[in-house]
Image: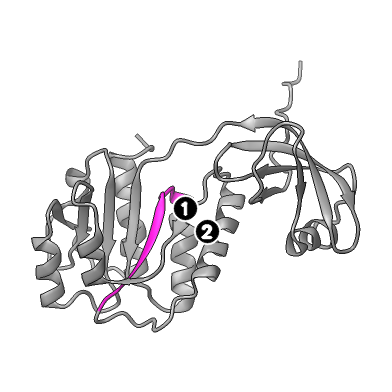
Amino acid sequence: MPATPAWPPKSLPRLFVRSPLSEGASVELDAGQANYLGNVMRLGAGAELLVFDGKSGEWLARIADADKKRMTLSVERQTREAETIPDVWLAFAPVKRTQTDWLIEKATELGVARLLPVMTQRTVAERVKLERLQAIAIEASEQCGRTIVPNVSEPVSLSRFLADRDEERALYFADENGGAAAAASFKPGPSTILTGPEGGFTDGERALVRAAPNSVAISLGPRILRAETAALAAIAAYMTTAGDWR
């Protein structure tokens, strides 16, 4: 006897919407979303899709009305409750645009709760386009099945980041000069992982971070890692030992 197929099927498009979702709610899509569903995905009235608002989980919706520039969805039922994610943030020094885009995408897939661009003395990116990075996090969340989109914070200097941080939140500092093994250092609970730029932190910056309350210097192994690789390696190690991969 064939197995009963899962419903809704995983092949349905997923879309993040900013309107609150509930059974029977009507959602007006923006022009970009309407264009994507209507002209790219070739979906029309009656087609089903999955939607999430970052708060209430995932919902099955149906296109109730559509024309060339607008589209309205009717929300039918909840398919998944909101995910529970570890309270781990990634504070990272932005690198070149392509690598930073990739970092945001993969960090979202790995499950971070928040992304904080931190500007250091050796940061090569002069400008960080916040809206672009948030859009990448949204798209990655749509693709990987997340129901909560990580927030991308405004860029801050390293000194401001250290001054404003909650000292009760553990700060795991990926220090290229060495530290305790990452896998043995991570503990469950509110955490921030701090990774550096191409070329690493300066000696003065390293001293400031190490002196910060509740800061733990960690090592990511014997090899030299690119900045974006180090950030993702640290997240993966955290998820394995203290996060939701256990």
Q: How many marks?
A: 2
Q: Residue at x 89, y 42 (%)?
A: 46
**Amino acid on which disc 2 is placed:** Ala
Q: Which badge, 1 or 2, is on the more N-terminal residue?
A: 2
- Percent position of residue 78, x then y: 67, 31
- Percent position of residue 88, x then y: 33, 48
Nearest the viewer among 180 and 33 is 33
Nearest the viewer among 151 and 233 is 151
Above or below residue 115? Residue 98 is: below
Crowd band around label 2 with a 10 angstrom C-alpha radius: few (<14), some (14–19), many (20+): many
Q: Is residue 229 left or right of residue 130?
A: left
Identify the residue position indicated by label 1 in the image: 150
Q: Are marks 1 and 2 in contact (CB under 8 Å)?
A: yes
Could you say which disc has been placed on residue 137 in the image? 2
Region rendered in magenta: 110-120
- Percent position of residue 129, x then y: 49, 75
Above or below residue 35? Residue 73 is: above
